Image (spheres, rainbow, N blue to C red):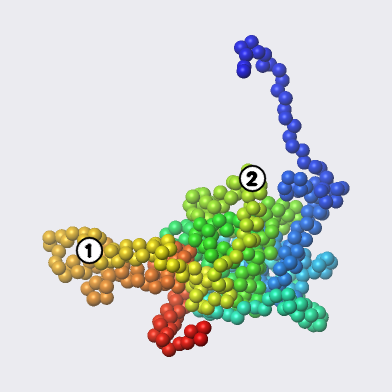
Amino acid sequence: MCQVEEDYHEPLQRADPLSVSKKCVKCKEGTAAVVIRAGDAFCGVCFKEYFIHKFRAMLGKNRVIFPGEKVLLAVSGGASSCSMLRQVQEGLSQNAHKKLRFSPGIVFIDEGGAVGQAVEDRRRAAAELQAVFTATGLPFVTVPLEEVLDLPSSVLAAASPVASGTGAYKAAVGDFVRSGAAGCRTSLDPERRAPADVQESRTRSLQQLIGSAKTLTAREDLLSTLRQHLLVHTARSEGYSKVMLGDNCTRLAIKLLTSISLGRGAQVAQDTGFSDSRYGDILLVRPMRDYSAKEIAYYNRLFGVPSVFIPGLETKATDKSSIQRLTESFVTKLQADFPSTVSTIYRTSEKLQTACRSSSTADLCDRCLLCMCALDTAAENASAFKATLISEQLSQAQAAGDTSVVTPAPKEHESAAAIGKRCTSGAEDCGNAASGEGCCSSAKGAESSDLRSLLCYSCQLTIRDMSSVERLPHYILSEAQRRQRRSQMREEIGEFLLDAAD
């Protein structure tokens, strides 16, 4: 208890701050330059060795990239992807301890048109990245996102999976040794392609496509899907069989919680795993998934790894503007107070496996039209998914057919013919009611429903947030029509087909 006559004029004692070891925990001699975690202080030399070893160990442990294979590095200009590019560049040097034996190339997807970036800013950012790519001596290509509007339907077609396993890796090593490593030429005569001048009409179409999504959550999800389609198409057209992504541990932890929030629980193992084989002949790998954002920032700062900031859809957005931003804010703030948050979420993602059929072995009709993962909508009639679907169908039927609820009362001077022409969506005349073709709102609802039957649950939510599915690229709509015709034909001849058990 405080006393009235107590003297409080004594000098306050300052608590000694927690001291960190001034010596490197590895070599015990050098002065610590980086503290990754409490008690893990490294000098500059040991931290570089630690960083490089983690990258080589990740590739060596999984053994999915064969010697002499062509690998495409997806570099966005951010810290993580640029750090990945530096690791590959150092692994290809002559004095590397364990030299990388694959043939890399670089691709940069210019997304400035989707976010409304000015043409001058897009050219300046592309020029800065091209200077970085040219210094590496590797072949590179710059692809504007507008090219996704002209992709062929083969992007969403089934392809035979690539060979994998220990036996295939040993055979590839033997072939590489016998060939004398002649196929791994990366620093000689790099092929350079200048960014093409994009037509303003194509940029406007892309902006209308992204803008058709009503929420920022749907826009970010749609942009991610289109970016992945363009990456896969570029890899196939340029002759690459692997694509390296720069997703780090922090980003994957955020992506794990985001995917679960968006209803992608069945696909989260492929979205966050080291390798993703959903496209069959093109394998997506994430060699930076063991690095935290803090480690990458320290490495880039200490060793001068250049990066280029390019604004995206989520730039300057508030924390509650989208599910992605809210999850990112939640994880990063929790990580600041509890440093094991990201690692705990990340280790949990390593144990996840999909319960349904793998996307690489599933039939094309059993895959999602957008994300190419196995469909997760084959639920029981008593499931929550079926209940939600029935409720939505009843709501759409009521809105399209029950005029007593939706259609306003007719005016006194309005004729019966004018009443029949009125659109149930609220417009005066949609042009279809008088011709007997049905209301435009019901036609849009039926078209959207047919398309959503080909999508997984998460992609259905994205399409539901779009004002019109007609904004989707032609290759998606044409593939949807092809699958619907194939499914209809299968139903017509189903009684003449033999079951798989027979």
Query: Residue 413: image x %, image y %?
Result: 12, 62
Residue positioned most to the right? 29
Looking at the rendered structure, which numbered label has been put on residue 89?
none
Outermost residue, bottom side = 496
Q: At which x and y percent is residue 427?
A: 26, 64
Q: In this view, does 33 lie above or below 425?
A: above
Which corner quadrant holds the N terminus?
Answer: top right
Crowding around mark 1 (Cα neighbors within 10 Å: few <14, some 14 to 19, many 20+) is few
- Please name the residue shown 48% across and 58% down the image: 217
Q: Is mark 1 on a helix, strand or loop?
A: helix
Residue 403 bears which disc, if any?
1
Residue 168 pos. (x, y %)? 72, 78
- The residue shown at (42%, 71%) is 453
Whether residue 495 is visible: yes
Quickly name the residue at label 2. 338
Tell me the kind of residue under disc 1. Thr
Decide: few, some or many residues near mark 2? Use Cα within 10 Å; few <14, some 14-19, many ≥20: few
Q: Are marks 2 and 1 in contact (CB under 8 Å)?
A: no
Residue closer to the observer: 256 or 148 = 256
Closer to the chain start, of discs 2 and 1, is 2
The answer to which of 298 and 279 lies nearer the viewer is: 279
